[in-house]
Image (cartoon, helix red, strand yellow):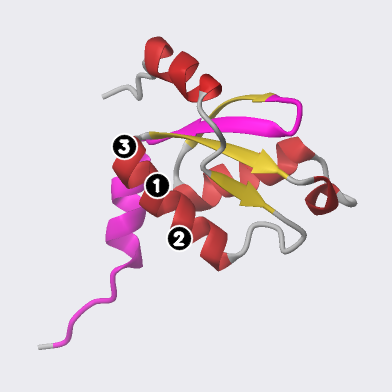
Amino acid sequence: MKDVKDQKKIQITWQDPSMMQIGKGGVSTNIVEEAKRLLKRHHYIKVRILRNAIGDSNKHDIMELLCQKTGAKLDGIRGNTGVIYKTRQMRSLKKQSKPATQR
């Protein structure tokens, strides 16, 4: 199935306050876990990138890295803020991350 984004929900998400911020630590494991938790609950989240996080890389690279690690897709970036949304790929990432149990 295709990953379909709901334009109405995305428009509402752009109006909401940011749900998380990426600081000078960059896209750490804690940021990735928090993004996964928020995506599971809300499906669409607004992420703000602080100026000190940008440094040598640019904001598009930071958002793409977050999307890659969470399995989400990037809707767009406005200024230092972006909206990402949940995809079906997140399920396969979740299954891969579970350790195999021995019998």
Which residue was labeled with disc 2? 33
**Foreground: disc 1 or disc 2:** 1
User: Which residue lies at the image location 38% right of the left edge and 43% below the top edge?
Assistant: 39
How many angstroms separate mark 1 from mark 3 (CA)?
15 Å
103 in relation to 59, above or below: below
Q: Is residue 65 left or right of residue 43?
A: right
How many angstroms separate mark 1 from mark 2 (CA)?
9 Å
Instruction: Give the amino acid type for the residue marked by disc 3 in the picture.
Output: Arg
Instruction: Give the amino acid type for the residue marked by disc 1 in the picture.
Output: Leu
Specify which label sits upstream in the sequence, 1 or 2. Answer: 2
Q: Secondary structure at mark 1?
A: helix
Q: Are marks 1 and 3 in contact (CB under 8 Å)?
A: no
Considering the image in quadrants, where does the C terminus appear? bottom left
Q: Which mark is residue 38?
A: 1
- The image quarter containing residue 64 is top right
Q: Residue furthest top?
A: 8
Q: Secondary structure at mark 3?
A: loop
Residue closer to the observer: 31 or 62: 31
Residue 27: image location, x then y, percent: 64, 57
User: Which residue lies at the image location 83% right of the left edge and 45% below the top edge?
Assistant: 51
